[in-house]
Amino acid sequence: MKFKHTFHVFVDNFNITYKQLLYRLAVLVVAGIVFYFSVIPFINGFLPELNNLINNAGDFVLKLLNGEVSELTKISEKVKEAYAALMDLVHAKTTDIAVVIVIFTVIYLIASFFNGLGNYATATCINDKMALRANSPFLSSLIKNIKQASLFNALYVPLTFLYDAVVAVAMFFFIFYLVNSIVPFLVCVFLFVLVIVLSIVLKLTFTCDWLPAIIRGKQSPVSALKYTFSRRNKETLNVLSNFVVMALIIFGLNVAAFFCTLGVGLLITIPASAVMIVSFYMVNYYDREEIKYFVDKNTVVKPAKEHTPTREEFFRGTED
């Protein structure tokens, strides 16, 4: 039922997708400009060798397609020489490469922080719609909750980045350096993607109540983090199974949008994926706390045993 209710809430709040799109594009453009001007002094040193390699590789492909086999040996030698020259340059400029990686990481974290602010605003808009049928403006929700959203993302972004980095690096070395000696390369690629998807599902499962507990439960980011890990085993398995299905659907839609529309469809599927996940966050929290909510203007979901707010909760505003 959670998945069904999530879909209805997502459709009911689909207009937020376009606001997410504009917001994410703005963040992406600013981050891209900053990254470009930050790394261009380092990249310029690699351009001659890189252009030489690309040009020779292009000539090789063209000769191969045109059937000029006699020229392939000569051009393949040029490709090897260009590649060797580029690798020598890479070894000679490891410090510059490390600086570029650090710059990229810092800009990525900052961009993730601002995207997280957008997700927080999305969650507040969806919460207002589910609780009161109120159409809260995205921008005003973003500005109004900027302090609490910043505190949340100051914890969420570094923790999830560290988790993702550790899992990705560990699995890459384990699969491609250890398992690759036993199983074929394509199987290693499959295993790597599988592990990454499962790690994302686990992360979403154990953090999905964090954001709603702050927005709906009026908890601090730290207490909300403790709350999200206090879920019982049976409930965790239910959330996990829903996220497995959702992750596969989202992954499939984004891959299909990339290949079938030459990437244009990603302008809708990526922000829609974020809205879908946040919708599940809110639905799961409402169900866990046994709070009634709207899935659309004509349908109210009521728990079998509705939670009655205490006097303190009522005056604090955690229940409507």
Image (cartoon, rainbow, N blue to C red):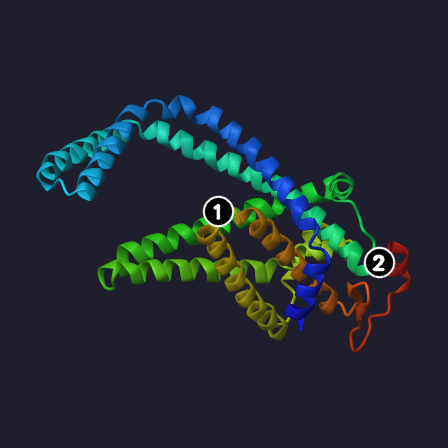
Answer with the quarter of the image where residue 97 lies. Answer: top left
Quarter holding the C terminus is: bottom right
Q: Is residue 22 visible?
A: yes
Q: Is residue 285 above or below residue 61?
A: below
Residue at the image position 61 percent from the left and 75 percent from the top: 234
**x%, y% of residue 309?**
86, 66
Q: Quadrant of residue 101?
A: top left
Task: Classify mark 1: helix, strand or loop.
Answer: loop
Q: Residue at x 83, y 57 (%)?
A: 133
**Residue 263 numbered tag:** 1
Distance, label 1 to label 2, CA atoms, is 37 Å
- Asked if residue 219 shows in the view, the reply is no
Helix, strand or loop at disc 2? helix
Q: What residue would you read off at disc 2?
A: 132
Image coords of residue 284 (percent x, y)? 68, 65
Pair 1/2: label in front: 1
Q: Which mark is residue 120?
A: none
Number of residues whose C-alpha sits closer than 10 Å to that of mark 1, classed few (under 14), some (14–19) or many (20 or more): few
Dividing the image into 4 quarters, which one contains the N terminus?
A: bottom right
